Image (tube, rainbow, N blue to C red):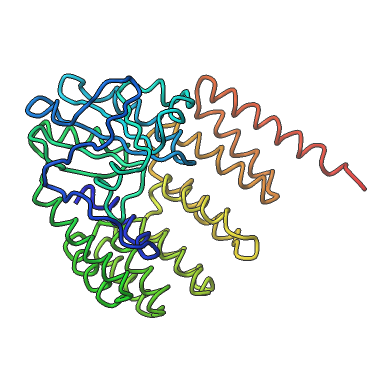
Amino acid sequence: MKHLSLILLSVFAAITLAAAAQAVPTGAPAPVIPSPIWMDGKLHRISDFKDKKVTVLFIWNLDQHMLPALQQMVQVARKCDSTKTAFLGVGGANLETLKKIPAITKLPFPVCADHNRATARLFCRSYDRPPLAVVISKDGKVYWRGSVRQVPVVVGQIHSGKFDLKERLRTEKFSDAVSNAIRGKKFEDALKLIREEWERFPDNMELLSMQLLLLERHLKRMPDAFKLIETAHKKQPENPGIFELELQLLRNAGKLDRQAEWCQRLIAAHGSSPQIMIKFADILTRMPIKDMRMDHIHSLLHTGWLKGKFANNNEKGRYALDFAKIMHGFGRTDLAYKLTVQAKKLLTGKAKAGAADAAEYYKKILFYSHKFTL
């Protein structure tokens, strides 16, 4: 289930797309790359590495996602053992265009010019979106498709014999069934499929999020969405991510009058974790002004400060600085000053000097601000 998330995140994108040409199934032999045009002038084939290395194809288009993906490809190629893993690039453009892009010419592996996207059609399923990584086993079979950043983990599992192809095939079958149900606007069927999968894997937040999306957007069943959140809390009482989904549900349903009760439950469940308190305080500060409740933000921050179990003084000092910044923004520079004084005692090195500067800044504001007039 570790890599199910990326499949799930792509399923809803298939709703608005026409059916694509049939791509090679997972577990099947990898097809031959149809384009013979490579940037180095040589012909590279997947079969060249059969019984020798795991092969990774990087498939991308010339769009806004390309440059960060190319940087990630370079990092991934460096992380993987080159004696066990081979990399091949597939760029969706003609040779002349590819040669004009410096980031592509500097890639540490051969790149094919897939000008008519024939290779992409062979490997990309209906819900796959380039940039896409395709991992091919030593025996020449397509084992995995997904995001570039996950390649080192997948390749490592294959090399160690821990990659579960059977489970991968099962999750892809599930993904296809959900995608087909959504395309056919059979939202009840899709919900049932996802719910069954979630019962097996209750810690999978994508499965929970997809159910909420179906209930809210497509089935218009807000009461059932709230019941689902309640069930999720019972299944995973230690999971703070459920509170984040619940807050979004409250906003979508126009039920932010329940936020005080939500905040109390969040504090009761996670008040001893300063990281969780500061995270949710930050989420609340980024809400629209009309929805922002400063008292709830303070409650979270204050609880984290008084009851939080900090790993060390540096962690507590950094928390104090974050707390101070928000209190200053809320007009309580006096509290911000007190917090930075505490931070200065807790921190060391450059962080201590930064806290001292912050304390001096807030001190000056307290001294001068009452003298200002219009």
Numbered label tally: 0
In the image, is 335 to the left or to the right of 55?
A: right
Q: Residue visible at 61% across and 60% down?
A: 288
Residue 319, compared with residue 233, is above or below; it is above
Residue 321, compared with residue 279, is above or below; it is above
In the image, is 166 to the left or to the right of 238?
A: left
Q: Residue visible at 24% across and 67% down?
A: 194
Residue 305, compared with residue 103, is above or below; it is below
Q: Pinpoint residue 232: horizontal percent, then vertical percent.
A: 29, 66
Q: Pinpoint residue 371: horizontal percent, then vertical percent.
A: 88, 42
Q: Pinpoint residue 111: horizontal percent, then vertical percent.
A: 33, 27
View extreme (right): residue: 374
In which quadrant of the rendered view does residue 49 lie? top left
Q: Residue visible at 19% across and 51% down?
A: 1
In the image, is 240 to the left or to the right of 355?
A: left
Q: Pinpoint residue 11: horizontal percent, then vertical percent.
A: 31, 59
Q: Residue visible at 42% across and 45% down?
A: 275
In which quadrant of the rendered view does residue 56 lie? top left
In the image, is 187 to the left or to the right of 373?
A: left
In front here: 193 or 225?
A: 193
